[in-house]
Image (tube, rainbow, N blue to C red):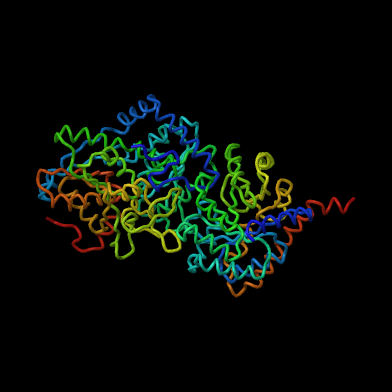
């Protein structure tokens, strides 16, 4: 695996489509990362924080009752929800904050959708005493009020973004504008495998720990590799993290799950790889939801973290090569999986992860009992409880009562 | 005409010993008919070149004024093909170089080959693509060259010497110098390091240099003029058009004319005007 190439391309996807003002900063970042990547002391320090601060390794948990309920393959949950701050996002923010410190940056900025990346960034910034500004769409701030408060508690300034759809896409635009303005002092801590080179490769490298642990754990538990690994895909960082160490294992099916929102046929969805076309968004050539004129379309999902009309360029590449299959799950199906996991396992998943779970349940039911399915439970659902209550509260008998 | 019209424009400026004024307008705000009228008004008032911005849903290099204009234009359903038609129409009436400013995705979607063909056919002379840096511009540059269109590159205060040299090598028409590290929008002050920046640029660039971003009116234009061959005024004009009902477009055109006149006057006086008159 030698991708991306030195220009940041995964096949035809990736690259650096940003204003000239940012190009020197991206070159500087790529060089600093290249140097850190080859420095064992960098990884040693990151490992220290991942273990003692974030709580890694996270368990690979056999979901006994969920498996029984599906009546098929054995379902394992990779418990990224048990990380400090409640999601996989901390793996990447710790890595990038150590890099930012190495580069002498005093200020970090980030975009956030569900607020998980914002919280993880604010957390890491507090830990290393860096100034922190988080851009968040106004619509998402309403959906994820709890996370907004958490970021404030952690000392970050949360800036509401009122442009466009007031969601993740617009938060990323605004973060890029901040970076263009303050590039000399500021590190832009991108939260996903999206964006210009070197972000897609760097974020993947910081998240691949998920897949590396899964490989070790499943060999220990089952003595063999899983048949299927399922992960949700918005920008795609938790999916790249768990898929990457298995790309060379042909026997392991990799399934990425996008948000089908109200249904692919309604046009109100965030299924970029299923329904989009190649284009340029946020600095990378990748699949994009867009109209005939190349205007970016609004995405829709009940999950703020998947509500994004682009996707990391490596996912576009893996779609084209056929190595990963990308499917989509509706808001409704995700909600059902959300409730199912709460009732069968006592785990409230993030709505993002509930998409992966819905797909895994669907797959497991059709597979033999000795098959193994691993789901990346990328985050916990505390942040979603209010918005789920709002949806279910409007429906009589919304909660199953078995 | 393409590249050649731009070259002739700068030659003319040099002969007349004045600095050029490049006017930027966001296409389709409040509508394309108004944009066409404003282009004509600006040229009649002395603009040496006109840059027409193609609205984009996610303009990361632009400040709130141009973001707003783009959002209003898109909400009205303005399409790239209609903007090219407008350019063709305007070309019948104005002789100055016309430059299209577009983020790359609309061009990529249209197809770089088709886009440059249709832009050239519409009488457009150059392209500025703010999110297409040197490393990514190869394909569009080939197509633009084959149609005689100038792909005008941007340089910024953060651009390194090595990048300046490489960008100078592929520059066509002129070089667009971004005055500040930041997004578009009128600013009160001229950045203190502009002189150093422009000296650095001039060491590598043989083509004419235009300075843009943050130039709000005659005052800033006069301050920037010593360092460049032309200044770009954008957001200040776009702000004048913001929220104006289409029914009042004639009055708007008169206001634009006055404003452009004032800035151009400052750029004429700068070079020779006042001092020469005083001799």
Question: As displayed, is residue A219 above or below residue A355?
Answer: above
Can I make out residue A381 in this image? no
Classify the position of the N terminus of chain A by image quarter: top left
Question: As displayed, is residue B251 above or below residue A92?
Answer: below
Q: Which of B12 and A191 is in front in this view?
A: B12
Q: Percent from the top left, x then y, of residue A147?
A: 36, 46
Q: Nearer the viewer, residue A26 or B73?
A: A26
Can I make out residue A58 in this image? yes
Q: Which of B212 and B259 is in front in this view?
A: B212
Residue at figure coordinates x 52%, y 65% from the top left: B73
| Residue A332 picture quarter | bottom left
Q: Percent from the top left, x then y, of residue A65?
A: 12, 46
Residue farthest to the top, as pictured: A41
Image-based side of A200 in relation to B83, left or right: left
Image-based side of B167 in relation to A145, left or right: right
Q: Percent from the top left, x then y, of residue A73?
A: 13, 46
| Residue A388 picture quarter | bottom left
Residue at figure coordinates x 27%, y 55% from the top left: A328
Classify the position of the C terminus of chain A by image quarter: bottom left
Question: As displayed, is residue B33 above or below residue B64?
Answer: below
Q: Percent from the top left, x then y, of residue A136?
A: 42, 50
């Amino acid at each position: 695996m030698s991708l991306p190439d030195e220009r940041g391309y995964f096949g035809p996807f990736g690259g650096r489509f940003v204003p000239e003002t940012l190009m020197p900063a991206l070159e500087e970042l790529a060089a600093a990362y290249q140097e850190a990547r080859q420095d064992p002391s960098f990884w040693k320090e990151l490992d220290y924080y991942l273990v003692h601060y974030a709580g890694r390794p996270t368990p690979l948990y056999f979901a006994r009752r969920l498996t029984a309920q599906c009546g098929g393959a054995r379902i394992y949950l990779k418990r990224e929800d048990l990380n400090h701050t409640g999601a996989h996002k901390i793996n990447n923010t710790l890595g990038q904050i150590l890099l930012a410190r190495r580069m002498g940056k005093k200020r970090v900025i980030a975009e956030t959708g569900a607020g998980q990346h914002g919280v993880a960034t604010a957390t890491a910034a507090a830990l290393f005493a860096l100034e922190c500004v988080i851009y968040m769409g106004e619509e998402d701030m309403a959906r994820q009020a709890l996370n907004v408060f958490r970021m404030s508690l952690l000392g970050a300034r949360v800036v509401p973004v009122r442009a466009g759809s007031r969601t993740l896409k617009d938060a990323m635009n605004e973060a890029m504008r901040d970076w263009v303005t303050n590039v000399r002092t500021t590190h832009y801590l991108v939260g996903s495998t999206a964006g210009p080179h070197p972000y897609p490769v760097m974020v993947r490298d910081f998240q691949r720990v998920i897949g590396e642990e899964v490989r070790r754990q499943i060999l220990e538990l089952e003595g063999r590799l899983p048949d299927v690994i399922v992960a949700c895909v918005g920008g795609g960082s938790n999916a790249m993290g768990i898929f990457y160490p298995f790309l060379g294992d042909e026997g392991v099916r990799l399934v990425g799950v996008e948000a089908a929102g109200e249904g692919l046929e309604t046009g109100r969805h965030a299924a970029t790889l299923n329904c989009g076309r190649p284009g340029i968004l946020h600095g990378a050539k990748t699949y994009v939801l867009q109209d005939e004129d190349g205007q970016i379309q609004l995405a829709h999902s009940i999950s703020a973290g998947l509500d994004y009309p682009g996707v990391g360029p490596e996912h576009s590449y893996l779609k084209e090569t056929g190595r990963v299959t990308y499917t989509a799950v509706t808001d409704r199906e995700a909600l059902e999986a959300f409730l199912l996991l709460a009732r069968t396992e006592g785990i409230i998943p993030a709505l993002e992860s509930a998409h992966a779970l819905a797909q895994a349940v669907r797959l497991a039911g059709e597979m033999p009992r000795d098959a193994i399915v691993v789901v990346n439970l990328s985050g916990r659902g505390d942040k979603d409880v209010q918005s789920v209550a709002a949806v279910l509260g409007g429906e009589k008998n919304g909660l199953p009562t078995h | 005409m393409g590249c050649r019209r731009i070259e002739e424009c700068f030659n003319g400026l040099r002969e007349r010993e004045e600095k050029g004024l490049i006017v930027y307008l966001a296409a389709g705000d409040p509508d394309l008919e108004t944009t066409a009228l404003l282009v004509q008004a600006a040229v009649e008032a002395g603009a040496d070149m006109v840059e027409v911005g193609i609205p984009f849903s996610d303009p990361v290099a632009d400040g709130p004024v141009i973001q707003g204009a783009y959002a209003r234009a898109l909400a009205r359903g303005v399409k790239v093909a209609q903007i090219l038609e407008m350019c063709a129409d305007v070309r019948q009436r104005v002789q100055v170089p016309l430059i299209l400013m577009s983020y790359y995705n609309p061009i990529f979607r249209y197809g770089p080959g088709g886009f440059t063909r249709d832009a050239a056919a519409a009488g457009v002379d150059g392209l500025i693509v703010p999110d297409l840096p040197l490393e990514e511009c190869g394909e569009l540059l080939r197509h633009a060259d084959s149609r005689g269109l100038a792909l005008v590159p941007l340089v910024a205060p953060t651009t390194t010497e090595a990048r300046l040299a490489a960008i100078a090598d592929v520059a066509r028409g002129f070089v667009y110098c971004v005055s500040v590290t930041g997004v578009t929008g009128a600013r009160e002050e001229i950045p203190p390091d502009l002189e150093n920046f422009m000296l650095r640029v001039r060491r590598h660039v043989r083509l004419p240099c235009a300075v843009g971003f943050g130039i709000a009116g005659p005052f800033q234009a006069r301050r920037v003029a010593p360092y460049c061959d032309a200044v770009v005024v954008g957001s200040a004009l776009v702000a004048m058009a913001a929220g104006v009902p289409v029914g009042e477009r004639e009055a708007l055109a008169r206001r634009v004319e006055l404003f452009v006149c004032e800035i151009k006057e400052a750029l004429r006086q700068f070079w020779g005007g006042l001092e020469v008159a005083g001799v």
